[in-house]
Image: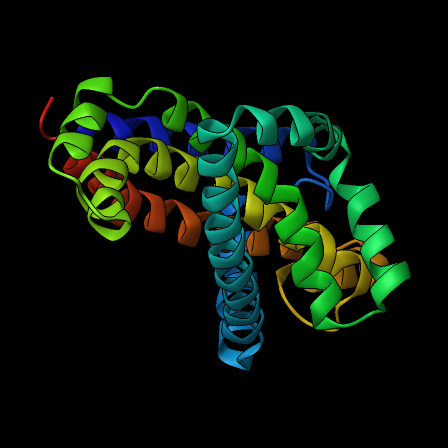
């Protein structure tokens, strides 16, 4: 913890020194960014925009994790399904997020459905690929035990499949969350009337307010890092505790 604090202090000091040297509104000092964050929070805009973005991230994240996990299991367990869907999955995985977002808005409209769909389509292949690897590496000994004891489908899922897939699912969740919130910002920047992405775009278009852009970015990064450290890292340690 002390190392992290010292590292953060050095980073802030370097930022302050660079701002002094540049002496330009294009590189505001840390205190200028903090002043903006406080002012935006007092107006209520900060909480509103961060809250809206978090809601979009949560909805898209949940849908993508559910669909991606199901697809990954199906691909890992079925050779035919894997051969049939591997190429479409690779195409989707390598399609730029910007392209998927624009097409979603063109085909569905400038609405919340299109925004969530764009994020889900960007994140889903990432989850499916990771979970597919987990499904391919299931312990054959446990599979044989399940057949010997004639496990029904639900018992097999609960006691054989899920425990072995947990580390892969958590890994997909951690990498997917960092991807999802970045894509949500792009989606908001292009076609939503609120959210962190909208706010960044607004301050860029209206006044090129770099303090506002950095301020919103730092606040949302802090929130997402907090979720990762306080929730996902602990969950990952829990599912890997047997090691």
Q: Residue furthest right?
A: 106
In which quadrant will I find the C terminus?
top left
Against 181, residue 96 (above or below) is above
Residue at x-position 36% and y-position 38%:
169
Q: Residue at x 61, y 35 (%)?
A: 19
Camera-nearest residue between 22 and 180: 180
Tell me, yes or no, if residue 165 can be seen here: yes
When asked about the image quadrant of residue 138, the answer is top left
Q: Quadrant of the N terminus?
A: top left
| The quarter of the displayed image where residue 215 is located | bottom right
Image height of 140 relative to 187, above or below: above
63 or 61: which is nearer to us? 63
- Seen from the viewer's position, the closer of residues 79 and 180 is 79
Whether residue 31 is visible to the viewer of this picture, yes or no, is no
In the rendered structure, the answer to whether residue 205 lies left or right of residue 54 reads right
In this figure, what is the number of numbered marks?
0
Q: Position of residue 208 (x, y in %)?
A: 80, 53
Judge by depth and name the residue closer to the eye, 118 or 18: 118
Position of 178 relative to 222 (above/below): above
Residue at 33% across, 26% down: 7
Left or right: 115 with respect to 143? Answer: right
Residue shown at the point (23%, 27%) measured from the top left: 143
Q: How is the rendered protein coloured?
A: rainbow
In the image, residue 204 lies at what x, y percent? Answer: 79, 55
Image x and y of residue 104, in percent: 81, 56
Q: Is residue 36 left or right of residue 242?
A: right
């Amino acid at each position: 913890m002390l190392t992290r604090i010292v590292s953060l202090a050095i980073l802030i000091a370097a930022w302050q020194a660079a701002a002094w040297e540049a002496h330009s509104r294009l590189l505001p000092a840390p205190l200028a960014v903090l002043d903006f964050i406080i002012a935006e929070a007092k107006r209520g805009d900060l909480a509103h925009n961060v809250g809206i973005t978090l809601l979009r991230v949560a909805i898209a994240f949940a849908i993508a994790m559910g669909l991606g996990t199901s697809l990954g299991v199906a691909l890992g367990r079925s050779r035919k399904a894997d051969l049939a869907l591997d190429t479409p999955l690779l195409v989707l995985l390598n399609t730029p997020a910007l392209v998927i977002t624009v097409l979603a808005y063109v085909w569905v409209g400038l609405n919340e459905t299109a925004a969530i769909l764009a994020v889900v389509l960007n994140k889903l292949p990432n989850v499916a690929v990771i979970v597919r690897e987990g499904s391919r590496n299931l312990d054959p000994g446990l599979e044989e035990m399940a057949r010997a004891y004639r496990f029904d489908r639900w018992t097999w899922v609960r006691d054989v499949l899920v425990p072995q897939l947990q580390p892969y699912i958590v890994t997909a969740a951690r990498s997917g969350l960092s991807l999802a919130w970045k894509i949500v910002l792009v989606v908001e920047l292009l076609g939503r009337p609120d959210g962190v992405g909208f706010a960044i775009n607004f301050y860029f278009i209206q006044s090129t307010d770099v303090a506002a852009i950095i301020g919103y970015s730092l606040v949302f990064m802090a929130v997402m890092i907090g979720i990762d450290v306080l929730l996902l890292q602990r969950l990952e340690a829990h599912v890997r505790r047997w090691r």
